[in-house]
Amino acid sequence: MPEFTPHPAALAENALLAQCDQRRQRRSGPGGQHRNKVETAIVLTHRASGLQGQAAERRSQADNRKMAIFRLRANLALSLRTERGEPSLLWQSRCVKRRIHIRASHDDFPTLLAEALDVLTLCDWNAAEAAQRLHCSLSQLLKFLKLEPRAFLQLNQQRQQRGLSALR
């Protein structure tokens, strides 16, 4: 059996950061008198793909790093595809009785999004088939993808390229 390579969005924080260049910047935003005096903005660039995650809306560099990591994971989930077999243990734990239980702001969301998009790619963007492989209902899969509007847009763009109707 071939060894499974995890999606970059699923890597532990330290492992993901080891694959990234980190830049600190001064940016406008909250901070009052401290604005433009400290480098609290964070830009993470994934070296292998060139994808970025950035954040500058918080006063704390640590908070901005956490948000930049989340955004980088989401960008990786949207852009990179990996081979999939059965649904992961994480997916199975979040998909109970064919319903997906997760918020878009949860740390696991980008990992699950990557898995859903991987399976959709495997199924040539046939959402009903992908839902069946993921052991969830079609409506739950679509509701999940709508949590990240770029993912739902990608689904419909891929379907349109294949002559399939758009999903709502």
Image (spheres, helix red, strand yellow):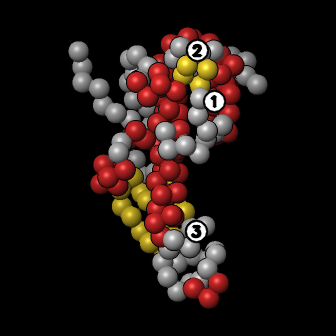
Q: Is residue 48 visible?
A: no
The answer to whether the residue labelled 2 contacts the one labelled 1, judged by CB atoms less than 8 Å apart, is no
Which residue is the site of mark 3? Answer: 58
C-alpha separation, residue under disc 2 versus residue under disc 3: 38 Å
Q: Quadrant of residue 160?
A: top right
For the point 61% across and 38% down, the residue is 103
Q: Locate residue 36 relative to residue 49 in the image: left or right.
A: right
**2 vs 3, front mark:** 2
Q: Give the structural element (helix, strand or loop) at label 3.
A: loop
Distance from label 2 to label 1 (Cα)? Answer: 15 Å
Q: Quadrant of residue 161?
A: top right
The amino acid pointed to by label 2 is Lys
- Identity of the residue drawn at 46% across and 54% down: 69
Q: Quadrant of the C terminus?
A: top right
- The residue at which mark 2 appears reads as 97
User: Label 2 neighbourhood size at 10 Å, few (<14), some (14-19), many (20+)?
Assistant: few
- Residue named by callout 1: 144
The amino acid marked with disc number 1 is Phe
Tag on residue 66?
Answer: none
Q: Can see residue 33?
A: yes
Front residue of 92 and 153: 92
How far across and how far down the image is residue 151, in percent?
Answer: 61, 35
Q: What residue appears at the point 46 percent right and 36 percent down from the top-left corner?
A: 111
